[in-house]
Structure formats: C-alpha cells, structure tokens
Amino acid sequence: MDQKRFEDAVKLRGRSFENNLRTYKLLAHRKPESELPTSNFNVAVLNVGAPAAGMNAAVRSAVRVGITEGHKMFAVSDGFEGFYKGQIKEVKWGDVGGWTGQGGSLLGTKRTLPAKHVDKIAEQMRKYNINALLVIGGFESLSLPDPTKALGSALQAFLSLLELSAARGKFDEFCVPMVMVPATVSNNVPGSDLSIGADTALNAITATCDRIKQSASGTKRRVFIIETMGGYCGYLATVGGLAAGADAAYIYEEQFDIRDLQANVEHLTEKMKTSIQRGLVLRNENSNDNYTTDFIYQLYSEEGRGVFDCRKNVLGHMQQGGAPSPFDRNFGTKISAKAIQWLSQKLLESYRRGKASLNRIMVP
C-alpha cells in the first residue's frame, strides 16, 4: 500500500475480495451509453414464491449488470401471475436505485405456478421478445400430499422452470436460457449451499430466542418451546439452535420418537439443578405430524411439573426479518450478477438464425 501497488494489494486479499470490488465498480457507476455494448437481447426478471430479504438487492444487481452487458431489462410484477397478465415493463439504471436495503419484494411475488397459463406467458414473451429469463425465488411453502417426500418439497423450487421447460415442445418462446437464483428463508434448494434470505431469517430467530431467554431472567426454572419455519428442511431450527444455545432441536431429517423426548426432559430436569435454570427447545414446523409443538409443550409441562414450567412460542412470519442483513445484500448482489453474466454467455453461444435458442434448462 505504501508503494501504491494497489492492484497487487487487491490480489493479495484473495479472489473473494477481488470479485467484490469488481462487482462494486460494475454496479456503482453508470458508464456512458456510447461505451456500453449493444446486444439486442431482452432479459426478464421476476420474483416467485414467498418473500425473502435480499430479493431486491438481487433484482437491482441483475438489472444493472444486464444494462452494462448491453441488454434491455424487463421487470415482471407479481411473479408468473403478473407475467401472464402482462404486468411487464422495461427498467432502467435509476429505477432500481436504493433497492439494496429494502426488505420483502418491491416487484411483488406470488406462489402461482405457470403450468395453467403457459399459452398466455408464451404470448407475453413473444410480445416483448424476451430472450432470457431470470427467476429469483423459492417455492418451499408449497405443501406436498405425501409429507414423507422431504426432497420433493425442496424440488418445488425448480417446478416453475421445469414446467416452462416441459412446454418447449409446444412453444418456441420457451427455448431460451432460463436460470434460477435461490431466494428462500428455508435454504432448501438442491444444488445450492445458501439461499438469499436465510441469513436474515437466522438473525431474526437468534435475536428472538435471546430475548425470550432474557424474559425468564426473573423467573427461574423455565423451558421455552419455539417453532421455526423451514418446511421440511431443518436448516433454520438446527443453525438457529446452534446460535441460540438450544438444548434440543427437532427436525424432519433426524427422526425422533417418545424416548428422545423423554431423554430431553430428563436432561432439562438435571439441568435445573445447576446454576443455569433456563431451557430452550427448537422445533421445525414440519418435523413430525404427530409430535406437534402443542404436544411437546404439554409433554414437557406434565413431565417437568414441580421442577420447571413451560412456555411455547410460534415465531411465524417475523422470521423473514425486516431489512436484509449485510451478508444477504452482498450475497444477493454477487450471485445475481453471476447469473446475468452466465445468461449473457449462453445467449451469445446459442444465438443463431436471428434469435437465441436453447433446449436445455440450466441452473448454475
């Protein structure tokens, strides 16, 4: 740094910092239109599924990177429902300014799947000449008729793009590059380590657990049963329990029976004899059909009678958090930028006969 070898200093900090700096420079300052490439491609961006903190940062990043690549960017309101209704408009560089710190989804997001309206969606894609599709979201909240298929519930995240892919035989409009950016608090999208929104949700869960435990500071010997979201995925319950110092976490992936519940009650009974006279138990919402939060609460209340009292708390939608955490803002910005650059590459590779054509669904 003293020798002003700034490029070497950046490289010494590692590839992650280098990529962060490159992405920042790409998004922070708009180049004159004369310096931008012209691609003649139209790219549509939409949010689907439940809102997740960081979605807006991902949309902002996608729009601005797309513009720097020379594409014309279109934003679709209210997911696939807005798509078939024609709620599509072109977005410019300044339209997404200040979106990074906004929670929820400013574009609007719905859980509607495209299968029933593929003909209308194809018509809209033809009308606006959409050459590529970027879907930001997750579909973890869709329940399955058979709850034993835990992986199936996660695969719902791909369902929209799979339905569009299946319709390629009937509609040429869907023979374009399509990519999904995982954005769900449940963090249950196959093929991805992390989803946008999971970090913010964990922060909200951990902060709430800390406050709940603090509420018992004046009342000794108390156990809290807390229910978290996550569908059939135990990520939030496990990592939330790890961060909050829980005594037990009940999740779908790790089956438990009455003997496990009994062992945990005995553990808490012994714990109450020590100086730490508070207990915390987390339960994933779909961990077991019969051992519900109410059942576990009643069991602990009865078995712990005379030793400790019990309280239950269903955290609900507050887990989605308000403003996205710094990690989710950064993560959403980075992977969305990567997704658009990947789409640009595929558009150039598959460009022939005056349009981009791709017969395979691709998810980086």
Image (cartoon, rainbow, N blue to C red):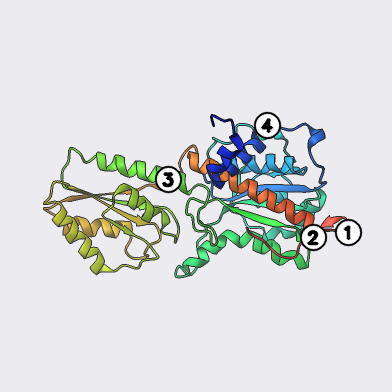
Using a 10 Å C-alpha cutoff, classify the residue at mark 3 as few (fewer than 14 neighbours), some (14 to 19) or many (20 or more). many
Report which residue position mark 4 lands on: 29
Q: As shown in the figure, which amino acid type bears the numbered disc 4?
A: His
Which one is in front, 153 or 273?
273
Of the two numbered discs 2 and 4 in the rendering, the one whose residue sits closer to the viewer: 4
Residues under numbered marks 2 and 1 in contact, where contact means CB atoms less than 8 Å apart:
yes
Figure check: 107 above or below 120: above
The one nearer the camera, 233 or 331, is: 331
Counting residues from the start of the chain, the first of labels 2 and 4 encountered is 4
Secondary structure at numbered mark 4: loop
The percent coordinates of residue 235 (x first, y second) are: 42, 56
**As drawn, 40 above or below 161:** above
40 relative to 86 in the view: left or right: right
Which tag is nearer the camera, tag 3 or tag 4? Answer: 4
Residue sitting farthest toward the front:
3
Residue under pointer 3: 319
Quadrant of the snapshot with the N terminus: top right
Amino acid carrying label 1: it is Arg
Q: Which residue is mark 1?
A: 353
Residue annotated with mark 2: 357
